[in-house]
Image: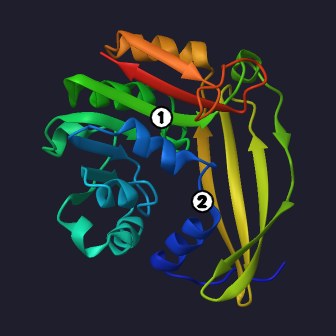
């Protein structure tokens, strides 16, 4: 294998943005569920893929992310008139109370952001912080890939090895991308690594996912203080069942 390429934090954020373009219809969905809302909080806002359209639509939006390079790209994604309505905050979505953000009518965790937290304790803390920052009529909305109860129990270790997933366009060049999924045997965990084959060498990015079945997440939402929660199988309100590939959750106090 070729030696890895040496790239800076901005290049890594750009590669992430080029690959992770969301699920079809998610931007339109989040715009719709935020219609009529005042302040909106996006947790794990990344490069501003959801945040920028919300600000452009007239919402006062606060985006929280712990990666400064991602936040720099999010700032660049904002149009001139939207910049005054958007605030980007470097911080941990499990420790929002330290950031002095205020209260929100909508709290969003798009594109499996909840699973990227470091285990169930961190997920529980994030949900509790989200609840604490919601107005009385506030709503939490998130989406993530769907898993069943069997995937959340004891599992044999498994390694997919490298599989080609396609190409992205990055800085004017076509870059092949491969993906590797490793299940270490720990329940509810998969380590996903992406390899970008740049001309100067490969670049790898890993995302560790701690996923949840809907019954597990529903119980955690109740524990965090949410009185109503519903799971759908897509952005158009599809029934959430064993065939669903997407879990869209709407929860209220």
Q: Secondary structure at mark 1?
A: strand
The residue at the point 72 percent across, 33 percent down is 245
Is 224 drawn above or below residue 78 in the view shown?
Answer: above
The residue at the point 65 percent across, 28 percent down is 188
- In this view, the residue in front, 215 or 180, is 215
| Label number found at residue 21 | 2
Residue 3 spot, x, y in % from top left: 74, 82
Residue at image mark 1: 142
| Label number found at residue 28 | none
| Viewer can see residue 85 | yes
Please identify the quadrant where the C terminus is shown: top left
The residue at the point 50 percent across, 70 percent down is 13
Residue 148 spot, x, y in % from top left: 72, 20
- In the rendered view, does 71 fall on the left or right side of 133? right
Disc 2 from disc 1: Cα separation: 16 Å
Report the number of numbered marks. Answer: 2
| Viewer can see residue 217 | no
Is 234 drawn above or below residue 154 in the view shown?
Answer: below
- In the rendered view, does 13 fall on the left or right side of 178? left
Residue 59 spot, x, y in % from top left: 25, 50
- In this view, the residue in front, 220 or 243, is 243
- In this view, the residue in front, 85 or 45, is 85
The residue at the point 67 percent across, 29 percent down is 146
- Of the numbered discs 2 and 1, the one sitting upstream in the chain is 2
């Amino acid at each position: 294998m070729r030696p890895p390429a040496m790239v800076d934090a901005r290049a890594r954020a750009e590669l992430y943005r080029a690959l992770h373009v969301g699920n079809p219809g998610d931007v339109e969905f989040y715009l719709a569920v935020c219609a009529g809302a005042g302040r909106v909080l996006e947790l794990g806002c990344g490069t501003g893929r959801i945040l920028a359209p919300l600000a452009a639509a007239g919402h006062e939006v606060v985006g929280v992310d712990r990666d400064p390079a991602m936040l720099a790209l999010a700032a660049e994604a904002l149009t001139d008139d939207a910049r005054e309505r958007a605030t980007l905050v470097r911080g941990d979505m499990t420790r929002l109370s330290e950031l002095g953000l205020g209260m929100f009518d909508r709290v969003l965790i798009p594109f499996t952001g909840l699973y990227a937290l470091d285990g169930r304790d961190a997920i529980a803390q994030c949900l509790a912080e989200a609840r604490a920052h919601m107005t009385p009529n506030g709503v939490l909305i998130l989406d993530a890939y769907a898993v069943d109860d069997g995937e959340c129990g004891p599992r044999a270790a498994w390694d997919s090895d490298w599989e080609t997933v396609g190409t992205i366009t990055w800085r004017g060049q076509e870059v092949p991308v491969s993906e590797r999924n490793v299940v270490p045997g720990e329940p509810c965990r998969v380590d996903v690594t992406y390899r970008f084959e740049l001309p100067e060498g490969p670049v790898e990015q890993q995302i560790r996912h701690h996923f949840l079945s809907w019954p597990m997440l529903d119980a955690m939402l109740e524990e965090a203080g949410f009185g109503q929660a519903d799971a759908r199988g897509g952005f158009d309100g599809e029934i959430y069942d064993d065939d669903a590939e997407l879990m869209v959750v709407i929860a209220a106090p």
